[in-house]
Image (spheres, coloured by chain):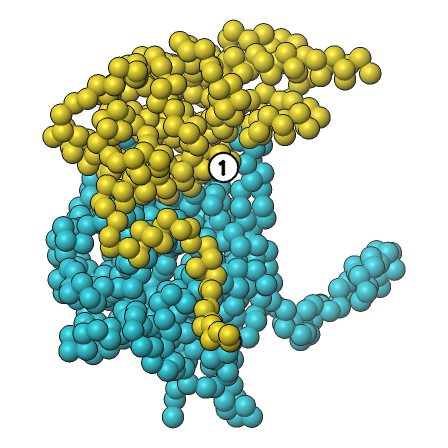
Chain colours: A yellow, B cyan
Amino acid sequence: MLGRGLKRKLSDYEESMAGLSSAFDSSRGLPYPLKRQLVLNMCLTKLQTYKMLVEPNLHRSVLIANTVRQIQEEMRQESSQQPLNICPGIAPAAHSFTGMESPGISLQLPSGVGQQESHCCELRSVEDPIENSLLIVSDDDMSSAISSILKDLDFVEDISPPTCLVPTGDDQPKFPENTGLKLEDDRQDLKGAECVFGSFEISNSTSYLKDLAIDDIFEDIDTSMYDSDFCCPPLMPPRSPSLATEEPLKTFPSCNSSSANNIQICRTDLSELDHIMEILVGS
Amino acid sequence: ADIISTVEFNYTGDLLATGDKGGRVVIFQREQETKSRPLSRGEYNVYSTFQSHEPEFDYLKSLEIEEKINKIRWLPQQNAAHFLLSTNDKTIKLWKISERDKRAEGYNLKDEDGRLRDPCRVTELRVPTLKPMDLMVEASPRRTFANAHTYHINSISVNSDYATYLSADDLRINLWHLEVTNRSFNIVDIKPANMEELTEVITAAEFHPHHCNVFVYSSSKGTIRLCDMRSSALCDQHSKFFEEPEDPSCRSFFSEIISSISDVKFSHSGRYMMTRDYLSVKVWDLNMENRPVETYQVEQPRVPSCPSVPVPVRVSNACPCPQVHEYLRSKLCSLYENDCIFDKFECCWNGSDSTIMTGSYNNFFRTFERSAQRDTTLEASRESSKPRTVLKPRKVCTSGKRKKDEISVDSLDFNKKILHTAWHPMENIIAVAATNNLYLFQEKVN
């Protein structure tokens, strides 16, 4: 049987479209909550990707963050009209994140900002099973993800002691201190990524150097051994731990806004640095 | 050839400057009409090429600063030399382009080939004379304005006083004097004390063409603020605030993203200004803040399904019949996914402000004649533009039967985008940058 197959032209544009977004665009039949969830997932994925970048685009980050906020606000309004269903398994946001962790997106999940609780569970119960298979992230996760991204994009220039460098009450993510970090690798990745942005916070102009109170952060780290000789630029640790081992010289993660977890990373790296220095000096 | 990142005619239109992603500036000069080659008038040939910016490495942040030229702005000519400002993400430079067509001969202390003469051997003194030589165009950097921007510079604009200029990044606008490189004044700062509260960034800024105290800046939320520098040193308080109220029926998840203004340009008259957002071009009267006086949908298809509905070129109220929606609106999610929704298209006026032009996808660009209410879609491509052939208008169809020569929405190439266009200040000559090719089109003269 000779088929009369129709030739279809697959343009470059079509090839680059993911199945879901084309479904969004072409299908009128997709239910609104599903569309919204899809957009939200795309936004969060993008934000996550931007966090990994050396220098995220501020314009895009702000636009995406606003979109997320808008969707979040809409969801909040909808859910405030729904009866509350508290899931027993979900602990208050401030101290636990494991319950909220969604597969696939390892967002930083500190509570930081005071948020309403029990949103994640509502989302799960209200939406269908199909939607549950999509990445569902709670309100807290979203707003704290946005906060953390925007905070990381902050630049420190002023002469006055930059508040973002010093941990302050509400802003500081609480989770690094309380939780036994379950997903060590992911956390390290994230902290690594945060350290990437942390380098943003040091002003880019040499004339600002003397105005910064960088020393405050490193007070508890003993850098006397490295003070004069060691003048390697503060490069951020690479994204994946495996890359780090390839580098011949491990460097300090640059100073970051605040969290104690970064100091832990500094200490870890310092001990490795110790080791490397020994080798170098020894040879 | 590298991707062109900016295109700008000078004040007379005789010179056309392009900047590219590799930090180079190429200047084209218009050929003078000569009796022997009467048709050559209007042709632009390369006049000068130089490396304006080099990639830099910020050691403190371990970041590479791109050498891509974001904007070029010419200074009005005041002597034989030409001056232009070119900027990358962080540094602005003032370049002097001058011609040298004479050289001095007959030095006393030097031989013709440059070797130094022994002073004892000099028996007589002579005055060096100037002899003609082949034309040489030299570009030299005269000023470097650096270290004033923490964020990426998106605009520069020369003031009508021809002594100062502004530079704008995502959160701040600085005022410079052309002669002073070690100091600039911050005139707008929208950075919040707490970065978590940041919801809006500056996307473009421009000085008024006649009033040296007035400038505007556009934002990612689709608003434009007009500021008067006489009112205060820091112009955080605007004098006028332009915003079109959103039509609730048009609302979508991407409403804010597509409302972000990518370019703002004053008309030559100074009475109007034009803004480009993702789907439309709007003309504003500076005296009316609550809505634009004209709105043009950039991507307007031919809609076969409702032939009786005239497709409006100019939309005076928001959101017409849904069937005549721009064809991009139905693809917003996909365009968001592949980041095309963040593309920053520029727009420009012609010399008399009667026509406006902007670029689009698939190497299409659009011109809108304001009073005639006529619009044209043209394509900049090698296949369709042999020299001296008249460009054929293009049409995009959304669905149904595709007429001959039409392009279906689904086969548009979103990687071929025309972001930068420029219009000669006096004549109908346009420069269109399509990725790494520059096209020059001229009105057909019979």
Report x, y in % for residue A195.
50, 25
Amino acid carrying label 1: it is Leu
Chain bearing tag 1 is A
Q: Nearer the viewer, residue A143 or A207?
A: A143
**Residue placed at 16% from the left, 23% from the top?**
A84
- In this figure, which residue is indicated by the disc labeled 1? A53
Residue B444 sits in quarter: bottom left
| B74 is higher (above) or lower (below) than B300 | above
Q: Is residue A270 above or below residue B197?
A: above
In the rendered image, the quadrant that contains the N terminus of chain B is bottom right
Percent across and percent down for residue B388 are 47, 86
Q: Quadrant of the C terminus of chain B?
A: bottom left
User: What residue lies at 75% left-to-right and 64% top-to-bottom?
Assistant: B107
Residue B25 % position (x, y): 54, 60
Q: Residue furthest front?
A: A1
Q: Is residue A21 left or right of residue B51?
A: left
Question: Where is residue B146 shown, x and y percent of the image?
Answer: 49, 41
